Amino acid sequence: MDPTTSSRRGFLRHAAGGLVISASLTAPETVQAQSQTPDSPTGSVLRTRGQLSSDGRTFLESERAVPVAGRADVLVCGGGPAGIGAALSAARAGAKVQLLEVAGCLGGVWTAGLLTKILDTENKTGIMKELLGEFMMRGGAVARKTKGTVYDPEIAKLVLEELCVAAGVQIQLHTRLVGTVLDERNRVAAVLTESKSGRQAWLADRFVDCSGDGDLAAHAGCRFDVGTGADCACQPMSMLALLTGVEPEAIQPFVRETGSEAKRRLLKLMEENGIMPTYRAPTLRHLHSGVYSLMTNHEYGVSAFDAGAITEATLRARREIHEIVAGMRKLGGPWKELSVVATAEQIGVREGRRIRGRFAITAEGLAEGLRHEEAVCRATFPIDVHALDGSGNKEISKSFKQGGLKPYDIPYPSLVAADVDGLLMAGRCISGDFIAHSSYRVTGNSVPMGEAAGLAAAVSLRKGVQPHELNWNDIKEDVSVRQ
C-alpha cells in the first residue's frame, strides 16, 4: 500500500471519532506560529483542495494548516442559557473564557428561539436569580408581575451581552463548532470551527459543552443516547413567533398568564373557525404593550442532526404560523389587525444527544425524589414529553408520566463527561434518560447547570486537577473561602 494512502486513511479514522493530536499543539509558541489568518479586510480565504471519488459520493480534502484563533483557560461552546451560566461563572472565578455561539446573538432559545418564558426558576439562586432580576427591572409590567420569567427577547440579548462583556468573557458569534481535538492523554485540547473567518482552531485547558445537542462531546468521541425506543424517537420541534395588532384587554381570556384554561379557549376558537394547529395546546403570552408571543406549532420526527430535515421543518413551521395568523385575522373583531412581527431565527429543538456522564439521572430517580450529596441544583419541573407523532391529541404524552415525579437533585457528576477528560456539559445534553431529560431540559435548570460547570472548570484549573477528580462540595468550599 502506498505510504501516503495509508497515512491518509489513518487520518480519516482519527477524524471519525475526534482528531487526536500531540499536547505540543497547546504550547504558546505553537499558537504564535500558527495564528496567521487570511487578510480579513480584503476578503482573502484559505482555499480548499482535494479530490472527488470516482463514484461522486465523497470528497477527499487535502491537508491544510488551520490557524489557531485563540487560547483560553475555559472554552464554552454555545451561548444559550447554559452557556451564559458557564461563561459568567468561570470568568467571575478568575478564568480567561472564550464563548463561541452559532447565532448572531447570545441567549440561544431565549433570544434566537423567541422562547419568552423561563420555566423552573422558583427555587433557583445565583446567576439565574440575577438574570431574572435584570429582565424584570428592564422589562415592562408583565416582566415585573412574573418576576422576570416572561421577558422581552431583545432586552435579554442586551442584558446577556453586557454581563458577559463586563465579566471579561471573549465572545465570537456566527461561529459553528465542527470538530474536537484530543491529545494523547485523552483530554480535550482544542475545537475546530467554521465561520466567515474560515476554519479555525481554538485551544483551552477546560471545555464546557453547552451546545444543546452535545456537539462538542460527540466530536470528542463520547458515547451518547438519543430519544427513546429502537427508532430513537424524539420530541417534536416548535417554532415561536412574536405578534402584534390586538389590545390586551380584548383578548385577555386567551392569554396564558390568565390561567391554564386560556390554552383550551384559544384552541376551541381556532378549531371552530377551521384553524387546526399542529400543537393542540396553543399558547399566547402578552410580553409588553401590544406585543405577544405565540407557540402553536409542532414538527414531528425531525432529527436535530439533519440540516436538510430541519430546513424543511423550519419552512413548514413558518408557513403554518403565517397561515394561522391570517386565519385569525379573518375572525374580525379584536383579531382583525393581528400580524406577525417576527418568527424565530432558530426553530426550537427539545431533544438532541444525551451525553454519557459519570452519573445518569433516571426516571426512577425522579419518582423517588433523588437526593445527591453533590447536587448543583434542585429541579421541580414535571415530566413533559410532547407527543412524539401527529396522531392522537398532539399535545403531551401522559404515558411517560406514570412513574411520577418528586423534586429531585441534578448531581455534579451528571455534568462531567465519562469518556474524555477536561470536558463538562450543561443544559439539555447532560447525562440522563429520556424521561428525566423531559423534566431537567427546561432553561430554569440550564442556567444553574452552566454556572456549576463553569465554576468547576475554573476551580479544577486552580487546583491542578481534572473536573472528574473534584467533589462539588470541595468546589463550593474553595469558592466560599476565596470570597
Image: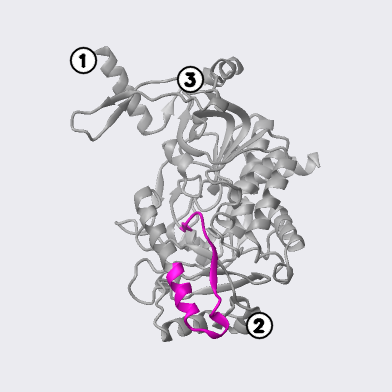
Q: Give above or below for 418 relative to 191.
A: below
The amino acid type, in three-letter code, at marker 2 is Glu
Residue at image coords 42%, 86%: 272
Question: Which x, y percent locates residue 412?
Answer: 59, 48
State yes or no: residue 348 in magenta. yes
Residue at image coords 72%, 53%: 126
Q: Identify the residue position indicated by label 3 in the image.
A: 22
Q: Which residue is nearer to you in this view: 432 or 203?
A: 203
Q: Identify the residue position indicated by label 1 in the image.
A: 1
Span shown in magenta? 321-350
Residue at image coords 48%, 58%: 348
Secondary structure of the residue carrying numbered label 2: helix
Q: Which residue appears farthest toward the right when viewing the image? A: 483
On the image, which quarter does residue 62 sit in?
top left
Q: Identify the residue position indicated by label 2 in the image.
A: 249
Residue at image coords 27%, 24%: 51
Q: Specify which label sits upstream in the sequence, 3 or 1.
A: 1
